[in-house]
Image (cartoon, rainbow, N blue to C red):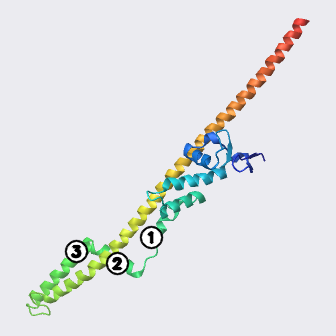
Amino acid sequence: MDNFTSDISGQQFPVEQCILGASIRQPIYRLIRKEYPNFGKDKYIAATELTKFKEAYIAEFLKDESGQLSQLDQQVIQSFKDNKVISAGIDSDVGGATSVGERIADKVAEFGGSWTFIISFVVFLLIWIALNTYWLNNKGFDPYPFILLNLILSCVAALQAPVIMMSQNRQEAKDRERARNDYMVNLKAELEIRELHEKIDHLIIRKEQELVEVQRDQVEKLGFLLKKMEKIEEAFKNK
């Protein structure tokens, strides 16, 4: 396997990792020059070495006004470094393990905000009023003005409201987690696109270099053939 010597560390690397300084994006190139002033456009660096400078550039790029990296940014950089997919565990993270109380709150909120609950409750009220007013001739267990019914309605409202709020709070937590994951996915996608552009630029420059070397080799061969033809012509003339 062919190797080359890195101008950064002086170590041997496979030639497949060889990257010319001219193909590196300017922000990363300036970062390398800051640490290695002798590194130039005609120098070579290994892909594994360049990755370290990419991470440093990304960390500098993501710093906020206070000069600190947020926890989300650190997770994105780590996933970018480990080449992991952020969106793989989003659904499981957002869903999470729910307790019995949380599941009950969700069911109560789901039923309490449906037409089934409204219609059932109206039917219950009508039956209660008709039973005590007409069938029991207003002498039943809850005659007019239905004090017991008012007490039951107050208790239902007092219990239902906090249960629905519990479900809403959990839904808000889910929405925050989804927004957090969306931010991380979008940020990593932007970084991946930047890296893809850099790889394409590097590939184009490398192909141009190979083309120039092929053309130079062809020119040398043509020059050699021309000289050989001139010698043959001179030999024929001398005869």
Q: Secondary structure at mark 1?
A: helix
Looking at the image, which residue sits at the far right?
239
- Image height check: is 199 above or below 158? above
Which x, y percent locates residue 11? Answer: 74, 51
Of the residues shown, which amino acid type is indicated by label 3?
Ile
Asked which quadrant contains residue 82, the reply is: bottom right
- Please indicate whether residue 204 sits to the left or right of residue 12 in the image: left
For the residues marked 3 and 2, what is the alpha-carbon distance in whole angstroms? 18 Å
Other-residue count near label 3 (Cα within 10 Å), few / some / many at <14 / 14–19 / ≥20: few
- Please indicate whether residue 60 sits to the left or right of residue 179 in the image: right
Residue beneath disc 2? 105
Which x, y percent locates residue 146? Answer: 12, 87
Residue beneath disc 1? 95
Which x, y percent locates residue 2? Answer: 77, 45
Q: Which mark is residue 118?
A: 3
Q: Nearer the viewer, mark 1 or mark 3?
A: 1
Q: Secondary structure at mark 2?
A: helix
Q: Secondary structure at mark 3?
A: helix
